[in-house]
Amino acid sequence: MNVITFSVFNLVIHGYSLNRLIQEILTRASLGQQTWIVTANPEILLHAKKDSHYWDTIRHADIRSVDGFGLQLVGWFKGSKTSRVTGVDLADEIAKVCSRQNWTLVLVGGQNGAADKSAWMLRKRHPELKVFAEDGGQISIDGIADEEGEKAMTRIQEYEADVILAAFGHPKQEYWIARYRDRFPSAKLFIGVGGTFDFWSGNTKRAPKWMQTVGLEWLYRLITQPKRWPRIFSALIVFPIKALSSK
């Protein structure tokens, strides 16, 4: 049997394929269970390594999927037949699921109107989809919403959201989900999706499909956004060394 889970910094990582993730979500929803997915990548895990509060927060997520080639490499070195599922690919599939299941999808967060632009794009792509967008107000570094954020959460409750995709960036989005998930009893699924709305809205262009397939999105970002090189170096060099040498 192929092992598809492994441990990084004492956190269990679930190297599930996209199909397996969707299966887990639907199974848990049929049992009346909420699911919280952290799309784990090297940046998130390095942050968790140095911040015990953040580590403990994402430890309480139901699934920590593999989002990032550096993390997939670590899984392979640890003997796991892990799959890599980017946050935007997972979110794309979740939108399809919501359309098929007649679930209400709420997008919260993002910048420069990205959530609203994303909702319009999704409506064009999935005419039957019930989708709403909220900018979510200002969120503190530890996930606390301001007055506008509180109003947004009231509206989300009124939408009776089945799925909430939060795009505040880490660590804010994980703290926000952990802090407020109990306010949304109708919700079946929470995912922190980072920059997904930027891709959906067209604010940021994704790498060509072939680069996505072979795990070279980092190279495309390096070429198109050279200022990101410290983050890319950290994800591909620093993170694997620390993850593989950690006991």
Image (spheres, helix red, strand yellow):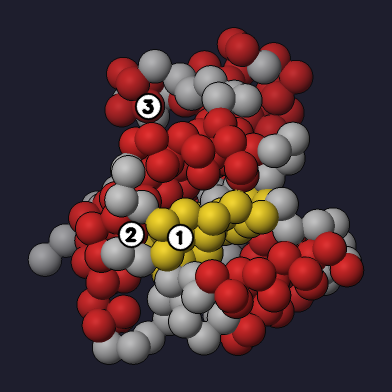
What percent of the width, then of the height, locates residue 184? 57, 81
The residue under the point 75% across, 19% down is 227
Closer-to-camera residue (92/104): 104
Question: Secondary structure under badge 1?
Answer: strand
Closer-to-camera residue (233/228): 228
The residue labelled by disc 2 is 98
Image quadrant occupied by the C terminus: bottom right
Identify the mark nearer the N-term, 3 or 2.
2
Identify the mark nearer the N-term, 1 or 2.
2
Residue lying furthest left: 1
Judge whether 93 appears above or below 140 on screen: above
Is the residue marked by circle 3 packed among few (<14), some (14-19), or many (20+) residues within 10 Å?
some
Q: Are marks 1 and 2 in contact (CB under 8 Å)?
A: yes
Judge whether residue 107 can be spotted in this image.
yes
Q: Quadrant of residue 65?
A: bottom left
Identify the mark nearer the N-term, 3 or 1.
1
The residue labelled by disc 1 is 105
The residue under the point 30% across, 64% down is 102
The residue under the point 50% across, 75% down is 160
What percent of the width, then of the height, locates residue 158? 59, 75
87 with respect to 203 (left or right): left
